[in-house]
Amino acid sequence: MSWIDIGHIDDVPLRGARLVKTRLGCIAIFRTAEAELFAASNACPHKGGPLSEGIVHGQSVTCPLHNWVFDLNTGKALGADEGRIDTYPVRLEAGRILLDARAVTERSAA
Amino acid sequence: MKQKLVVIGAGMASGRVLEHLTETAPDAFDITLFNAEPRGNYNRIMLSPVLSGEKTYEDIVTHDGDWYAQRGIACRFGEHVVKIDREMKVVEGENGHVPYDKLLIATGSAPFIIPVPGKDLPGVITYRDLDDTNAMIDAAAKGGNAVVIGGGLLGLEAAAGLAERGMTVTVVHLMGHLMERQLDEAAGYLLRKDLERRGITVRTQASTKAILGEGRAEAVLLESGETLPADLVVMAVGIRPETRLATDAGLDVARGIEVNAQMQSSDPDVLAVGECVEFNGHLFGLVAPLYDQAKVVANTLLGQPDAFVVKELATKLKVTGCDLFSAGDFTEGEGREDIVFRDPARGVYKRLVIEDDRLIGAVMYGDTADGSWFFGLIKDGTDIDEMRDTLIFGPAYQGGDTADPLSAVAALPPEAEICGCNGVCKGTIVEAIAAGATDLAAVRASTKASASCGTCTGLVEQVLQVTLGDEFQMPAAQPICGCTDLTHEDVRRLIKAQELKSQAAVWQELGWKTPNGCHVCRPAINYYLLADWPLEYQDDPQSRFVNERKHANIQKDGTFSVVPRMWGGITNPAELRAIADAAEKYDVPTVKVTGGQRIDLLGVKGEDLPAIWADLNKAGLVSGHAYSKGLRTVKTCVGTDHCRFGTQDSTGLGIKLEQILWGSWTPHKLKLAVSGCPRNCAEATCKDIGVVCVDSGYQIGIGGAAGMDVKETELLCQVPTEDEAIEVVMAVTQAYREGGKYLDRLYKWLAKVGMDWVRANVVDDLENRRALVERFELSQSIYRKDPWAEHVRDKAPSYAPMADFTLEAAE
């Protein structure tokens, strides 16, 4: 697996998110704890709401448009809603955020 | 012929190597031991008890002069090694050469010094060895103020020790909570509480800018501009492997000296052990893996096969009375689940992290008795599926009751006040219940508890339930959300009563079931905290809906709308020109006049927000807060300035009110209007607060709305002067801020408390009115400012993507 350095952990607010733009759409980088990150598609499957603008709680995010909640581990919508967002491998090394290069170049445009 | 072994550094790791070597093969080596400190090996991890006075240096010596003498080890203590010559296989000390066949580098670690001005002043010390400890003990003897920079393991032990010795101690920590590498926020909060209880001040998210002083340290200057007086400054921000000798000798060094599993460096005759090494990307700061390494070093030197493996680690803080435990990995990763247990009354917090039916991490505070059992499960990778439901209760779990949601009420002492309006304490209510008042109405009738504003109704019901048990049928109260069993009213009251001033405090003390709430409760808690503790609590943007976090309204396509403030609906050509220029410059697709008498720029891209704000700011335009649960607009008519019917200067009053109220957060949006006469062109009678001017003064109505519900205001009072009208509006706004449930418009709050209560507290009781105004002003001293200007200045980069790969060629 090859990794791309996309920035420093402190660039992402705690319990917040930042965007990574790719040719295949935007990826949201979520910071759920001091040293805990997730990467997922930015677009809510419901109406395309920008998930990076949602409230981040536990290991979940709530879409700002209509309050769909997604588990960032699986990408699955929680509760009564049915849907899924793509998730991507991301890791933290010495404060740097490393994103799976395939997320940027090869993924299906979901 | 015996081989010559030279050891550089007499610390805990090399001490253990020498023990192994001299026990198993006393005649294998001629050993020379260099140590920069003028003494042999002592138990470095027990320096904290020495600092706090619980132990002396003599208690922690592990190898004294006799020990080395008996084993024929040549000691060169107090002598620095100048150079390692690998070609000649010679170590150059300050007092002469020593040849080696095998060399062991055990130089340990050096404290990290943050590069701020004043770092070299006398009175600034690190915390690493016995000399540092003695320097701190000497400094503490003089008393005064100590500032410890760094809220990690070492910093906190230093802080506790200095406090124990009578100094006034402040811990300055860069991160959001203490010991963030070992603890999560909840445990960090409890630790902070324990430290504060023993008089230590803790400043988190505080960055050191400089150490000030003439000739010696006198104060620490923070980035915020605040100065903390400091007779002693202890730097305990971290350590780094001490690798200078190895680097100079041309060995492979990354962050530490790189070693293989046999603890050999890139030169097989040079071994390294302890905090100075790096193995497979790992560094080592705790003693357990160092002892494992020491055994491997001894075996490698003796030609025995052995290999070092990295194991899970557990951490404990050596501060008497602070009971915490942390093991394994409780942060990064996917596919993990939490089990959280909190007992607010005992200050206990436990969190287990589970992955694939195995325990992989544990954090505990307050009750760590089961720590080693959990640590065992982590190390062994035990399948915990079978015991999952009861796992958190530990090995001794034999069944028992589920957590009692009423425990907070049950724990209240009899003298605890339940009803603030009528001054009724828990004991009085319990007595009334014993005397036969067995439902809410009866308690109300006999004690007056919850008979006024009613916000304590839930609490009175809980006292009934705690006292009567099953005999009392609790009305189904609506909890805030799935994270808690408490209602909004309960939480608001408990935040005030228990003086909870942080989110972590609310989660812990009120027994939240999730680590940090959800999108429903967190904005509410954030509001309650900032409304009740304006100075102590800092607004958390991450607990706000996107509109309030980004100070613009999100639209369905993800763009934003930007509404600059027009005070009282008054504008001028320069402002209009700036708005027009901005609309063109940022390709704003829609420009619309709003119902609140201002102009909305719709369809602004999120990335452009700071730039458009900066442009608008230049023309004097500030945020209109068209997005906030807070003061929106004060709509006005033209009043006596132009209108032939106007009775008062309604425009002027509207502008004054808007300038006083803007920036304030309220439970829901707050819209005002001022009409200059009863013809009411500003539609003041369907606003949350509406003023209608008449010849004899100002009629103030409250509780109007024109949204999902349409409501006409009810008359609160008529006052003769503009000043008094302003005062009443401020007071009623503050009463709503303090009592309203989050997301209740003012009319809903009014329906709960009743107009009589509002009139009594805001209009008739002048002292209370003034107190409300003062509290409102106190809060406004923080919040009456333009968030756009602030974001332009401090946060602009965060509006852009952190990385953009759309411009690079795809592979």
Image: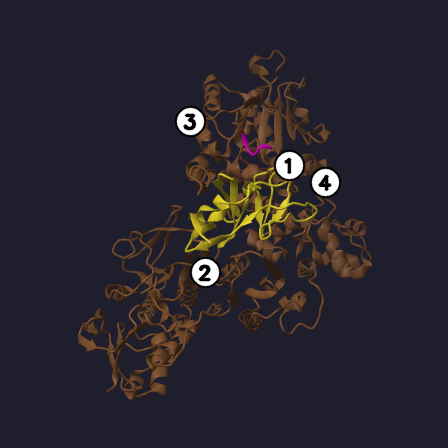
Chain colours: A yellow, B brown
Cα gap from disc 4 to disc 3, whole angstroms: 44 Å
Q: Main secondary structure of the magenta part?
A: loop
Q: Secondary structure at mark 3?
A: helix
Q: Residues within 10 Å of mark 4 (few under 14, many from 20)?
A: some
Q: Secondary structure at mark 2?
A: loop
Residue drawn at the location 30% of the way across and 72% of the way down: B268
> Does the CB distance between marks 1 and 4 fall below 8 Å?
no
Residue picked out by circle 2: B200
Residue picked out by circle 4: B752
Whether residue B539 is visible to the viewer of this picture, yes or no, is: no
> Does the CB distance between marks 4 and 3 fall below 8 Å?
no
Residue stretch rendered in magenta on the structure: B555-562
Kind of residue indicated by mark 2: Ile
Q: Looking at the image, which is closer to me, B185 or B366?
A: B185
Q: Looking at the image, which is closer to me, B241 or B143?
A: B241
Q: Secondary structure at mark 4?
A: helix
Residue drawn at the location 69% of the way across and 62% of the way down: B403
Chain of the residue on which disc 4 is drawn:
B
Q: Earlier in the sequence, mark 1 or mark 4?
A: 4
Could you say which disc has been placed on residue B618 in the image?
3
Residue drawn at the location 70% of the way across and 43% of the way down: B453
Could you say which disc has been placed on residue B762 in the image?
1
Q: Residues within 10 Å of mark 2 (few under 14, many from 20)?
A: many
Kind of residue indicated by mark 1: Val
Depth check, mark 2 against mark 1: the one in front is: 2
